[in-house]
Image (cartoon, rainbow, N blue to C red):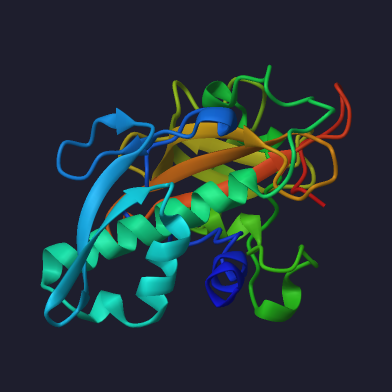
Amino acid sequence: MTGLREIRLFLFPLILLSMFCSGLCMAQHVGFAAPGSGAEVDHYDVTLPVQADQSRRFTIPADCQDAVDAQNLGGRQFGGPVEHRLWIKVVNDCRYHALLHQFPVATRDFVSDYDFLNAPLTELPIQEACRTPGDCPPTPSGIAHAANMFATMMSPPPLPQTLEPAGPTACRFRDGLFRGYLSPDPTAASGWRCRTDDAAPGYRVLSVDYADVNGDGFQDAVLRLIPLGTGRGHAPRILPVTRLGADGPFILPP
């Protein structure tokens, strides 16, 4: 039970998932990136040290519970840099698999027919970045404030007045990629100003999965994004979004 509790403690890691996390597809058939080749597979085998003089072979995801238990017992401290990276990958693959499979299949779905790879940023549940922790509006337990994922895109340069009002075509992912600047502006119709810039920071959508991550019966989309730009780190983030009606706004899962 200790291992299961440890998995649940990390069901919503919105920030700093390892750069060695899995590649993803539909929640009903989660794909993984095979160690070494990076090929998308539905399972993989990996041998990891669990003690100073002992290794064990794990099949992921079938042996996820055993792998997390072994990691919690100190297995990650053994081996060299390659083994450490593999431990990070395995644990994060298992966490993500647990996130997508902890609840039954959703009965109401208002997200899977939406094109997230070409979504306007203003339709995603982002808000002005928190200036101090006290400025952040409440979010579900364990979920970071989504706006902070885009904080570097909301800072000058350029100044907000040099940006165009964000519209349906101005500030959006295109084939899963956006690089540019985003700034809140209550005088703009969308509430935002933005500008695309190939040299600016941004995000690439690596994949989109679908599952009911909070058990409320509504299908959720889980966007896996990697930050682009120098000095940002390159660990993927995940952003779960949902909506409660066909024409409703996208929100964080309640």
Left or right, residue 156 beside residue 210: left
Q: Position of residue 122 (x, y in %)?
A: 68, 36
Instruction: Give x and y (percent) for residue 96.
Output: 51, 51
Position of 130 with respect to 141 (left or right) is left
Q: At 67% from the left edge and 50% from the top edge, which residue is drawn?
A: 102
**Between 5 and 18, the one nearer to me in the picture:** 5
Instruction: Count all numbered tags in the image, as a single digit.
Output: 0
Closer-to-camera residue (154/117) = 117
Task: Using residue 159 as the reference point, say whether residue 214 is left or right of it.
Answer: right
- For image coordinates 32% across by 63% down, the residue present is 88
Residue 154 visible in this rendered orientation of the protein: no
Q: Quadrant of residue 148?
A: bottom right
As rendered, which of 182 and 210 lies closer to the eye?
210
Figure check: 49 above or below 220: below
Q: Residue at x 32, y 82 (%)?
A: 74
Q: Is residue 5 above or below residue 128?
A: below
Q: Position of residue 71 (x, y in %)?
A: 36, 73
Q: In the image, is residue 76 above or below residue 192? A: below
Residue 140 in which image quadrant: bottom right
Question: Depth check: 14 or 219 in front?
Answer: 219
Q: Residue 100: horizontal and vertical position, in percent?
A: 60, 44
Inspect this view and state whether residue 8 appears: yes
Q: Residue furthest top?
A: 113
At x 41%, y 78%, the residue is 72
Q: Is residue 15 above or below residue 251?
A: below
